[in-house]
Image (spheres, helix red, strand yellow):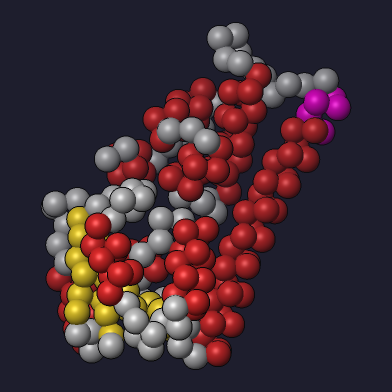
Amino acid sequence: MKIGYARVSTQDQNFELQEDALNKSGCEIIYKEIVSGTKADRPELNKLIEHIRKGDVVIVYKLDRLGRSLKHLLEMVDFFNKKEVGLQSISDSIDTTTPQGRLFFNISASFAEFEKDLIRERTRAGLEAARARGRKGGRRRGMSKEAEQKAILVETYYREGKMSVMEIAKEVGISKMTLYKYLRHRNVPISAYSYKKEIK
């Protein structure tokens, strides 16, 4: 059975684009819910997980509709594999029902993790080099050393543009509002569109 899953973040958004694509893909059932991508509690996704059986295929319009993060997405794919359930993403051209599709997904996920590791490594190297030169990142009074180091990480990730604001916040272990505070503290230009979008 082909089972669809569609998600939107707010009441203002609609399911039409996702539903049309899922119906065109032959989904017999479509689970729909309105919930932020960061929320762990997803009742409809839980129902889908309870419903799936060996040989089924879960179809999404895009991978970010399913996973909260790369880690969560990999966990979901691993769970589906153990259940012998396939995953297809229409927009991302991912299909784990084929050996080639599983290989492509694993390689893509590995590169994404590798890229994040490189960013972390460069950041740590930069901090160590600055400390070796007797610099502490220009910490201002009123901001702890730990907070300043987090601010430096935030700036690095943000300027790289390789991670979303939400991913940066989770990686550094802070809220989105604190993230933006750090960016302002370090005089980093912030996109007004990004700011309005991410603080919803």
Residue at x 55%, y 43% (from the top left corner)? 171
Quarter containing the N terminus:
bottom left
Q: Nearer the viewer, residue 78 or 196?
A: 78
Q: Residue at x 74, y 39 (%)?
A: 124
Whether residue 130 is visible: yes
Left or right relative to 20: residue 86: right
Q: Nearer the viewer, residue 76 or 145?
A: 76
Q: Where residue 110 sits: x, y (%)?
A: 63, 67
Q: Could you tell me which quadrant the C terminus lies in?
A: top left
191 w.r.t. 88: above or below: above
Can you say whether 4 is above or below 190 in the image? below
* Residue pictured at 30% horizontal, 62% vertical: 46
Q: Magenta stretch: residue 56 in it?
A: no
Q: Residue furthest right?
A: 132
Q: Which residue range is magenta in the image?
A: 129-133
Percent position (x, y) of residue 43? Answer: 24, 57
- Which secondary structure dominates the residues rendered in magenta? helix
Q: Horizontally, is 68 left or right of 121 in the view?
A: left
- Quarter-wise, where is residue 6 in the image? bottom left
Whether 132 is among the magenta residues is: yes
Q: Residue furthest top?
A: 141
Q: Nearer the viewer, residue 124 or 126?
A: 124
Q: Image quarter for residue 3?
A: bottom left
Instruction: Judge whether 139 appears above or below 73 on screen.
Output: above
